[in-house]
Image (tube, grey):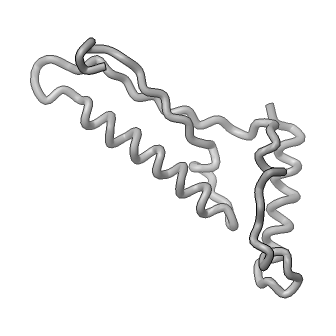
């Protein structure tokens, strides 16, 4: 891209990055990392001299989309134990996500 002096890099993140929720910290932090990477690369591509590189960085943060992603999530066995301290929180979040997915694009 530098050689041809043009190009576009598209990184996919998630709207969840903007609205973190409990029990999804690993997922949300990975999306923060994608944003940080995108921002850092965009600074590296800013012109240090008079000639710009001509490379754009675009980060896409889609909202809730109907996919099987949630159904494929595997929780640790411990999190399904009735004595697990976060069981009520996790179940509540699962119900909310299911409702979001019902109305998603």
* Residue lying at the far bottom of the rendered structure: 83
x, y percent for residue 32: 49, 51
Taking the image as shown, residue 43 lies to the left or right of residue 13, namely: left
x, y percent for residue 64: 74, 40
x, y percent for residue 72: 79, 51
x, y percent for residue 46: 23, 29
Q: Quadrant of the C terminus?
A: top right
Taking the image as shown, residue 90 lies to the left or right of residue 61, namely: right
Q: Is residue 74 above or below residue 50?
A: below
* Residue lying at the far left of the rendered structure: 49
Q: Residue at 80%, 62% (x, y): give it.
A: 93
Q: Quadrant of the N terminus?
A: top left
Looking at the rendered structure, the number of numbered marks drawn on it comes to: 0
Q: Residue at 62%, 43% (x, y): give it.
A: 15
Q: Is residue 26 above or below residue 36?
A: below
Residue 77, picture quadrant: bottom right
Q: Residue at 43%, 26% (x, y): give it.
A: 9
Residue 76, picture quadrant: bottom right
Taking the image as shown, residue 90 lies to the left or right of residue 59, namely: right
């Amino acid at each position: 891209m530098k050689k041809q002096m043009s190009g576009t890099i598209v990184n996919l993140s998630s709207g969840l990055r903007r609205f973190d929720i409990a029990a999804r910290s690993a997922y949300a932090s990975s999306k923060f990392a994608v944003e940080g990477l995108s921002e850092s690369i965009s600074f590296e591509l800013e012109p240090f001299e008079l000639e710009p590189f001509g490379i754009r960085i675009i980060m896409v943060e889609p909202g809730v989309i109907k996919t099987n992603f949630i159904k494929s999530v595997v929780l640790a066995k411990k999190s399904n134990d009735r004595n697990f301290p976060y069981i009520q929180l996790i179940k509540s979040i699962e119900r909310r996500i299911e409702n979001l997915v019902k109305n998603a694009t």
